[in-house]
Image (spheres, rainbow, N blue to C red):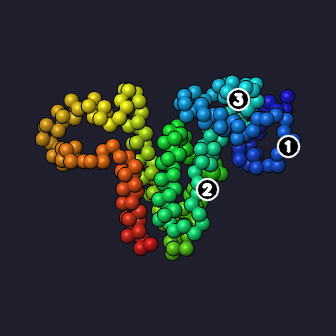
Amino acid sequence: MASQQKPEKSTSLWERLDRPASAPRSTLTPQRIAAAAVGIADTEGLDAVTMRRLAAELGVAPMAAYRYVSGKDELLELMVDFAYGELALPDDGTGWRDTMLALATRTRAVTLQHTWMARTAAFTLTPNQLAVPERILAALDGLGLDADTMMAVLRTVTAYVNGALDAEISLLRLMADHGWSNGDETRTALAPRMTWLLNTGRYPTYSRYACEATRTDDPDWQFRTGLECVLDGIAARLGI
């Protein structure tokens, strides 16, 4: 049947989906496929997302989704685009700094809700995802920066966001793997090793941090403060 044939691979997923839709032959849509796949990944992990598992979730024949996607790679594109669709873009005319603050904060929120994105989104190109750098570049445009410098600013902030998220998600996974529910339980479990290391006297500044820090369990503050430092540096370096 035509509805069960895999789409041609000579064109991208998004080019195919942008074509005028033919008369619907079923209730299955790219949006339904993406929502179901995201639901599986959120609750069971990315490895649980297979075409067969997806078909069972949707209540359709195993080959039905192939009308829209050629396989798991394109399914992941749909999932990433769906997740980025939850990220509200700042209004046009918002200044470059407020734009970056808003998008970085909202990207973190969406990624923490869909932690599988940390494994898939870095080099995926989808309409909703590309709207984020487009909005940032538009906010930087007109400030007297050349195209290469604008992209360097974008990549610098993106690198901070990705690095901070990678560290945050890695800690959350470590805690989940060991059954630690909060920072106190994590520190208690790691205390014997940390105590021995600090008692060697080789790490006096880290020891001061361990004794004096008050925002150890405040990832929102940590993320925002680091981001503000990055933006301060950009503003000072470029005079914007």
Sequence-wise, which precedes: disc 3 or disc 1?
A: 1
At mark 1, the secondary structure is loop
Please report the residue visible at 21 percent of the width from the left and 48 percent of the height from the top. 212
User: In the displayed structure, would residue 218 be above or below residue 142?
Assistant: above
Residue 217 drawn at (x, y percent): 33, 43
Nearer the N terminus, badge 3 or badge 2?
3
Mark 3 or 2, closer to the camera: 3
Q: Quadrant of the N terminus?
A: top right
- Residue 1 seen in the current view: yes
Q: Which label sits on residue 131? A: 2
For the residues labelled 3 and 2, say whether their Cβ atoms are less than 8 Å apart: no
Q: Which mark is residue 128?
A: none
Whole-percent x and y of residue 198?
17, 38
What residue is shown at x 48% (from left), y 53% (from top)? 105
Amino acid type at circle 3 is Leu
For residue 67, above or below residue 60: below
Residue 22's mark?
1
Q: Earlier in the sequence, mark 2 or mark 1?
A: 1
Q: Are marks 3 and 1 in contact (CB under 8 Å)?
A: no
Q: Is residue 113 left or right of residue 183?
A: right
Task: Identify the residue at horizontal 68%, vertical 33% (top origin).
Answer: 71
The type of residue carrying mark 1 is Ser
SS at mark 3? helix
Q: CA distance from mark 3 to mark 2?
A: 29 Å
Q: Nearer the viewer, residue 8 or 111?
A: 111
**Label 3 vs label 1, nearer the camera:** 3
Tell me the residue that label 3 is attached to: 58
Q: Quadrant of residue 133?
A: bottom right
> Are dots 2 and 1 in contact, CB under 8 Å?
no
Quadrant for the C terminus in the image? bottom left
- Mark 2 lies on a secondary structure that is helix
Q: Amino acid at mark 2?
A: Ala
